[in-house]
Structures are given as C-alpha cells and as structure tokens.
Image (cartoon, rainbow, N blue to C red):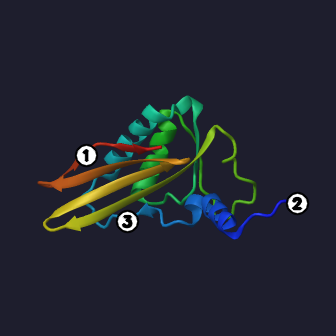
C-alpha cells in the first residue's frame, strides 16, 4: 500500500473541495450595475470557449443573487445543461465526467479614489476568465477578457 504525504493530501483536499467551500459569489454593493448585462456578456464569452451543445456545467455555489439568476437562465437559453448547486448533495458529483465542468463566479467591486472598478471572474473547471469593468458617467464600461488556462 502506498502512503500519501501530508502536503500532497492537503493539496488534494483543497483541490477537491473547490468552489463549494471557497469565498465565491456576488459582492456588489452598488445597485447601479446592470447585472443582467454582465451575465449576458459572460454567457457569450463562455460560449466562445466551451461550446454549449458539448458542455455541461455544474454550479458549485448558490446562485440566488441577481447575477447568478441571470447567468443560470442565460446559460440554459444558450443551450448549456446546467446542474444546480445543492449544499446537501448526497449523490456523487459528476465532475469526474470529462463533459461536466464545475462553475463558480466572483463578482466584486473595488473603490479606487473617485472611480469604481468592478471585476467578474468565472472559474470553469481548472481554467478561469476575468473581465474588469469601470464605472464612468453612470455607465459601466467593460475591459478585455483574460483567460487563464
């Protein structure tokens, strides 16, 4: 029988717990941001990287906020199979299935001087995409998407 070292076991535990125990979610305090628009843009970017007809997504966090509800709806309308988050999930996760990708998001706000900067990060499997937004003259201006593989 082969033994696993403590550091390897700790790392494996962190990786396997993934989004469910991490501080992911919607941290916006400003009601001026059109979260429906941000969710639509996120769905479009996801579709360019992970084809809807070939990708199933498993939400690893509750999506009861405005962004999460819009994201889930948009993903389904685009053609994704979306498995909802269940904190009391008794069945084994399908994340080991090559066609099911865990999905988490962080939507937050950083106040910098007189301007508001927002950031959206979507974690899909082992990759992530991030987009900054800057509030100018009452509107939110998007930056470029970055993709970390």
Name the mark on residue 27. 3
Vertical comparison of 77 with 6: above or below: above
Q: Earlier in the sequence, mark 3 or mark 1?
A: 3
Direction from residue 145 to residue 134 in the image, left or right: left
Instruction: For mark 1, give the secondary structure.
Output: loop
Residues at circles 1 and 2 in contact by the CB criterion of under 8 Å: no
Q: Earlier in the sequence, mark 1 or mark 2?
A: 2
Nearest to the observer: residue 89 or residue 45? 45
| Residue lying furthest right | 1
Q: Residue tagged by mark 2? A: 1
Residue 14 x/y as whole percent: 61, 64
**Relative to the observer, which residue lies in front, 70 or 54?**
54
Q: Position of residue 101 (x, y in %)?
A: 59, 44
Rendered image quadrant of residue 13: bottom right
Q: How many marks?
A: 3
The residue at 24%/59% (across/down) is 117
Query: Is label 3 or label 1 in front?
Result: 1
Query: Picture quarter containing residue 10?
Result: bottom right
Image quadrant where one finds the N terminus: bottom right
Label 2: how many Cα within 10 Å (few below 14, some 14–19, many 20+) = few
Q: Mark 1 — residue?
A: 143
């Amino acid at each position: 029988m082969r033994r696993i070292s403590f550091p390897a076991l700790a790392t494996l535990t962190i990786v396997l717990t993934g989004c469910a125990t991490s501080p992911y979610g919607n941290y916006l305090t400003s009601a001026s941001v059109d979260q429906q628009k941000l969710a639509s843009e996120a769905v479009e970017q996801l579709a360019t990287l992970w084809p809807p007809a070939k990708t199933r997504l498993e939400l690893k966090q509750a999506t009861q906020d405005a962004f999460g509800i819009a994201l889930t709806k948009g993903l389904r309308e685009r053609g994704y199979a979306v498995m909802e988050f269940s904190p009391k999930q008794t069945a084994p996760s399908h994340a080991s299935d090559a066609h099911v990708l865990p999905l988490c998001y962080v939507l937050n706000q950083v106040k910098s001087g007189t301007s508001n900067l927002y950031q959206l990060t979507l974690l899909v499997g082992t990759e992530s995409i991030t987009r900054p937004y800057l509030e100018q003259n009452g509107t939110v201006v998007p930056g470029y998407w970055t993709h970390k593989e």
